[in-house]
Image: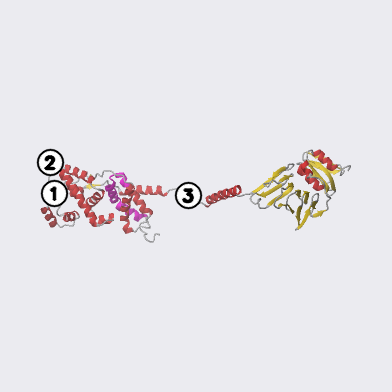
Amino acid sequence: MKNENNILKWLNNELSEDEVKDLKQSENIETLEKIAFYASQMQAPQRDAQQALDAFKDRKMSKKETKVIPLNFKTFMRVAAVLVVMLASSYFLFFNNTKSFETQIAETQNVILPDASEVILNAQSTLKYNKKTWKDERDLQLSGEAFFKVSKGQKFTVNTRVGTVQVLGTQFNVKERPNYFEVQCYEGLVAVTYNNKTLKLSKGKSFMVLDGTIQVVDDFNAENPSWLRAESSFEKIPLNQVISELERQYDLKIDFKAVDGSQLFTGTFTHTDKNIALQSITIPLKLSYKIEGRNVTLYNYGK
Amino acid sequence: MDIHNPKLCEENYFNKFYLEHVQHASNFAFYKCGDKDHALDLVQDAFSKIWENCSKIDFTKAKTYLFTTVNNLFLNNVKHHKVVLEYAKAAPYIDKTNESPEYLLEEEEFKKKLQNAISLLTDAQREVFLLNRIDGMKYREIAELLNVSQKAVEKRMSGALKILREHIENI
């Protein structure tokens, strides 16, 4: 192809008729002519443009109808709620170092603390301490009644809603009930803080607060609290407190509206038999009682 | 968004644009892949790309965009078929006056050879050759469409002619 440029021009319709004639004379382009001619008779598959457009519209419509899931605030909240629950529960699972013990009515529980101190929980009481900080400070939260045998070591603190008891190594009983706070020292020395005032108790001494007033209590000789022997002992205690204790040791509902709840009671009741226990309270006070299932009614004897 | 190009996003304009270019684009796609249905798929996909991006495309460049998109889509899923083009029905022979059976037979044979020879071209050559021959496009237009220089188009064209000629004259 000598006249490549001209041939290209010819196929691009850029040559005049004369120039085409010259080209044909200078070179045998018969084959090229045929190629060019027949090639232009070819055709690609013919499309019906309108039909194709309709098909396109259909496709576009079906394509546009992709399911749109809007970023729903509700869904977001749901996910957030699940996350919060998971985080919270994992927090409590992995980061909650508070160890807690709880007793129900008529139940006692022995708890050994990490420093080998022993705590005996009386009925319906709760004891809490922080596992993590226990090494640094022996700090407990108590609600209810418990007897402590503290092994020697750092300061040992029992916090109650009413007062705080601090010791070094000793045995003592703490009783914190509604309108009632009592600390009894069985061994060693106990420091009781009540209303920002600190009082030191030596062995055999008690500290008691009844309805907000500090009571003068006689010394005692017992080695340990009577409730450890399944008894409750009282020394000039108002009847309503005795009855509350009775309700904690037996699952009872005691109605004592008919009698004087403030009269003092000195004595002991057992935790093993509710009839004997009721009798040991009522007979010395000259009272009678009636049991109907869980309900007990006290009334004055002879009236 | 529509400020730049209110036209293409209007359904009427788009339809017009579609009807105007669908055959042409389909030819182009066919030169590339050689499969009738596949070619139409490519074209439809390209048109939906244009519709989706109608606000971003300059109306004057929409045609180039269309062909470029067809080309890209083709490259994305290269499924090669032998590209064999049919002749239009009732196409005349080069010498309209000569009706001798011998001549007609010769010409038919030539046409078959040409069909085969075209399928032997490289993709680039075939595309240029057919766009020029079938769609009657100038080299400059083809260059614009393929986004290459006119020189490159001419080179492909002469390469195509060389191969076709050799193939047809030798065999």
Q: Is residue B160 left or right of residue B78?
A: left
Q: Secondary structure at mark 3?
A: loop
Residue flagged by tag 3: what amino acid is it? Ile
Find the distance from the CA under tag 2 to the CA under tag 1.
18 Å
Residue flagged by tag 2: what amino acid is it? Glu
Q: Chain of mark 3?
A: A
Residue flagged by tag 1: what amino acid is it? Glu
Find the distance from the CA under tag 2 to the CA under tag 3.
70 Å
- Residue carrying label 1: A30
In the image, the segment drawn in magenta is B11-40
The one of A303 and A198 positioned closer to us in this rendering: A198
Looking at the rendered structure, the number of numbered marks drawn on it comes to: 3
Residue B102: numbered disc:
2
Q: Residue B121 at x, y = what percent?
A: 23, 47
- Quadrant location of the C terminus of chain B? top left
Q: Is residue B48 left or right of residue A285?
A: left
Of callouts 1 and 3, the N-terminal one: 1
* Type of secondary structure dominating the magenta stretch: helix
- Residue B123 visible in this rendered orientation of the protein: yes
Residue A70: numbered disc:
none
Q: Is residue A65 left or right of residue A245?
A: left
User: Do the CB atoms of the residues marked 2 and 1 lie less than 8 Å apart?
Assistant: no
- Residue carrying label 3: A69
